[in-house]
Image: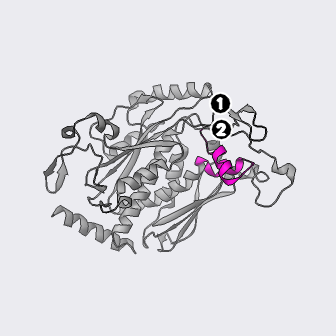
Amino acid sequence: MRYLTAGESHGPELTTIIEGIPAGLTLSVEAINHELARRQGGYGRGGRMKIEKDQVRITSGVRHGQTLGSPITMIVENRDWKNWQKVMSVEAVSEKEQKLRRVAKPRPGHADLVGGMKYHHSDLRNVLERSSARETTMRVAVGAIAKQILAAVEIEIASHVVILGGIEASIPEKLSVKDIQAKTAISEVNMVDGSVEESVKKLIDQTKKAGDTIGGVVEVRTDNIPAGLGSYVQWDHKLDGKIAQSILSINAFKGVEFGIGFEAARQPGSKVMDEIIWDDGYKRTSNHLGGFEGGMTNGEQIIVRGVMKPIPTLYKPLMSVDIDTKEPYKASVERSDSTAVPAASVVAENVVATVLAEEVLEKFSSDTMDELQQAVKAYREAIRNF
């Protein structure tokens, strides 16, 4: 399984092509659109989300509701495109029109300046249009298909916000995917701890009024994952490494950890390692390592967290430098949110689902969904009897 995404933030549409999806998957477009809606939700989102109501259009690889085994193409149209047709025109335009919404004052924390330097763009809009988090729309669409593949082999995944703007949710010691889904479904900030909801929303309102932004920590959990996905034999076969890369590829994410993560540095080995027991299969008495040993899943719940920095586009912008005059200026302001952490947890959930689906499809015979389901069932039985 592999995919590419294409499209600019204010271009006509966003596109992805996915190859390697088994034939015979009953594909729900409604489920894809549900994930896209989750990505656009969350308290603190800005004006763009009121304009765009993302709906996917599938143009290849699916017939009569089932995948064909051939490449799947998905498109999401940008409704705001009608207001940007001259600015983002594919055809050549006049010099006057070229200057429409030109960006010459890079925003600290964004790709603007370095991207302009790398690709020799004198208009930094050429950078920010693609480096925008709008690109994650298509990664969520891909993840929505990945989640349907995982569900077909009884693997479940969910996400929630652990910390937002310094306010930390209280997390139960045992937290299943179904628990997360039930609790976040009634939370505007995608948290499982309802007692902090109002404090978080108040902080978001205060931050927006101050023209500032806040970040946070999100967590993704996966239940019923079989042991043995990934491998120790080569560095780039380690599944936790692949997941870590996928998390860090999300816009504004700056750190990742599994299980107790960095807390392991403060504890002796006797309190970090997960003891092994036999209980109708191999199990661990704890899950400090977040479901991984030696780069492989060990059969326990996968627990992975990512930290998202505050969005760098500020309505009270920081100082920057005009690339034409080299004089100090306040950075350019693009439409933005005071926080996107709740939405980012949805993105993280879907990119992790994509990596897990890729790994499942690589390990097991998967030309068709029947083959895949039979192979996974046989493998689960084999490892239980090891």
Q: Residue at x 64, y 49 (%)?
A: 115
- Asked whether, in this view, residue 113 is left or right of residue 94, the answer is left
Q: Residue at x 46, y 65 (%)?
A: 27
On the rendered image, what quadrant is the C terminus found in?
Answer: bottom left
Residue 222 % position (x, y): 34, 51
- Asked whether, in this view, residue 4 is left or right of residue 162, the answer is right
Q: Which residue is mark 2?
A: 107
Residue 4 % position (x, y): 55, 62
Amino acid type, label 2: Arg
Q: Which residue is mark 1?
A: 318
Q: Residue at x 46, y 53 (%)?
A: 351
On the rendered image, what quadrant is the N terminus found in?
Answer: bottom left
Q: Are marks 2 and 1 in contact (CB under 8 Å)?
A: yes
Residue 50 is drawn in which quadrant?
top right
- The answer to whether one can see residue 109 in this image is yes
Element assignment for label 1: loop
Q: Residue at x 60, y 49 (%)?
A: 134
Residue 26 % position (x, y): 44, 67
Mark identifier at residue 293: none
Q: Which residues are magenta?
A: 109-133
Q: Is residue 114 above or below residue 376?
A: above
Q: In the depicted view, which residue is nearer to us: 174 or 187?
A: 174
Amino acid type, label 1: Leu
Residue 163 is drawn in which quadrant?
top left
Q: Is residue 236 above or below residue 271?
A: below
Q: Residues within 10 Å of mark 2 (few under 14, many from 20)?
A: many
Asked if residue 120 is among those painted magenta in the image, a careful observer would answer yes
- Asked whether, in this view, residue 383 is left or right of residue 292, the answer is left
Element assignment for label 2: loop
Q: Label 2 to label 1, Cα distance in Å? A: 8 Å
Residue 137 % position (x, y): 56, 52
